[in-house]
């Protein structure tokens, strides 16, 4: 099931996408009163999920009592427009990206990683599918893209074993970890260079965990102006989702709605010689099998 946040009639709403991805069924029209995605994640019951799945499987003319909105008439927003906390990100979590970034990172990380590299990405508001991202011409020299699979937790996690992690996942979405490479090197850490306004496009929706086999082994790609740049599988993660969530939960409480972005494969702009960074007018597409495509334009 695909669940999304969208705007119509100047109001943010929640909905479930029809099986043919042409219609949105609003949550309120099937009796759900959640005000935002964070509330839905924390509160949705198994019976509500089953009802939403049933409705989403039907064409609009078979669900006359449920409001169906044409997808093309809605403005899709990031599924969680305002995350409660920083997004947890994984650095160099594909061997191919670690190798291509070795020169940029000054060989700071071993070829055989023993421990995950975590960093925070501050998000004032997550940008949505088809949103415009500023190139920050007076600040950024080296604007880069990183297609990533993001995981959203369904409930608070503390001291979770790897075997239990699957039960803590609400769903998955696409995140483009936009990065200012010059700010990364200038400051000696990644927080500022990963966290400028607009640097977290996410979406277009969340695919619930029951739709994707665990651990996810999905094709992941990025395109710049139609040119294929990244092409890999999420099955190639150095540290998988079970390891990541279990390890983090040993020392911190991960709240329901927490977003964890699992890293990017080879093909980011920094990996080319010379680097192929983004510029004004570029269109970036991040695609993940079974989820969809996230589009961004650089301005």
Image (tube, helix red, strand yellow):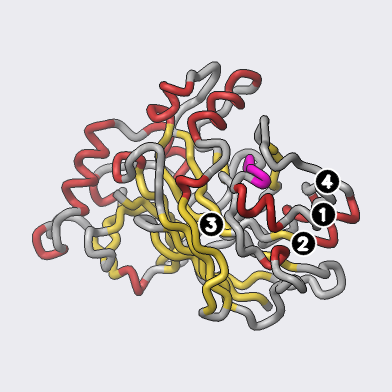
Q: Which residue carries the number 4 mark?
A: 189
Q: Main secondary structure of the magenta part?
A: strand
Residue 244 in sight in this render: yes
Instruction: Give me the C-alpha separation between circle 4 and circle 3.
Output: 23 Å
Question: Outermost residue, front direction?
Answer: 111
Q: Which residue carries the number 2 mark?
A: 180
Q: Secondary structure at mark 1?
A: helix
Q: Are marks 1 and 4 in contact (CB under 8 Å)?
A: yes
Q: Is residue 17 left or right of residue 80?
A: left
Mark with earlier residue (2, 3): 2
Question: Outermost residue, right direction?
Answer: 186
- What mark, if any, has residue 184 been given in the picture? 1
Mark toward the viewer: 1 or 3? 1
What residue range appears in magenta?
A: 87-92
Instruction: Give me the C-alpha separation between circle 1 and circle 3.
Output: 21 Å
Q: Are marks 1 and 2 in contact (CB under 8 Å)?
A: yes
Residue at 66% across, 47% down = 92
Instruction: Give me the C-alpha separation between circle 1 and circle 2.
Output: 7 Å
In the image, residue 114 sits, relative to residue 281, either above or below, namely above
Mark with earlier residue (4, 3): 4
């Amino acid at each position: 099931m695909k669940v999304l946040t969208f705007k119509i009639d100047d109001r943010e709403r929640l909905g479930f996408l029809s099986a043919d991805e042409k219609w949105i069924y609003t949550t309120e029209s099937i009796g759900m009163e959640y005000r935002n995605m964070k509330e839905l994640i924390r509160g949705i019951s198994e019976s509500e999920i089953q009802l939403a799945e049933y409705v989403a499987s039907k064409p609009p003319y078979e669900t006359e009592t449920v409001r169906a909105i044409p997808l093309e008439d809605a403005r899709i927003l990031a599924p969680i427009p305002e995350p409660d906390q920083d997004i947890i990100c994984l650095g160099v979590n594909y061997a191919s990206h670690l190798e291509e970034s070795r020169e940029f990172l000054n060989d700071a990380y071993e070829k055989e990683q023993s421990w995950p590299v975590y960093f925070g990405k501050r998000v004032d508001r997550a940008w949505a599918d088809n949103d415009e991202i500023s190139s920050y011409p007076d600040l950024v020299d080296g604007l880069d893209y990183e297609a990533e699979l993001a995981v959203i937790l369904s409930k608070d996690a503390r001291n979770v074993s790897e075997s239990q992690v699957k039960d803590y996942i609400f769903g998955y979405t696409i995140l483009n970890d936009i990065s200012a490479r010059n700010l990364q090197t200038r400051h000696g850490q990644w927080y500022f260079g990963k966290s400028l306004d607009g640097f977290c496009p996410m979406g277009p929706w969340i695919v619930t965990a029951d739709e994707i086999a665990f651990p996810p082994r999905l094709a992941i790609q990025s395109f710049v102006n139609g040119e294929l740049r990244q092409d890999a599988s999420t099955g190639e993660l150095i540290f998988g989702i079970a390891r990541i969530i279990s390890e983090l939960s040993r020392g911190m409480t991960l709240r329901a709605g927490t977003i964890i972005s699992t890293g990017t494969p080879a093909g980011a702009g920094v990996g080319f010689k010379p680097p192929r960074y983004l510029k004004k007018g570029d269109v970036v597409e991040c695609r993940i099998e079974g989820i969809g495509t996230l589009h961004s334009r650089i301005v």
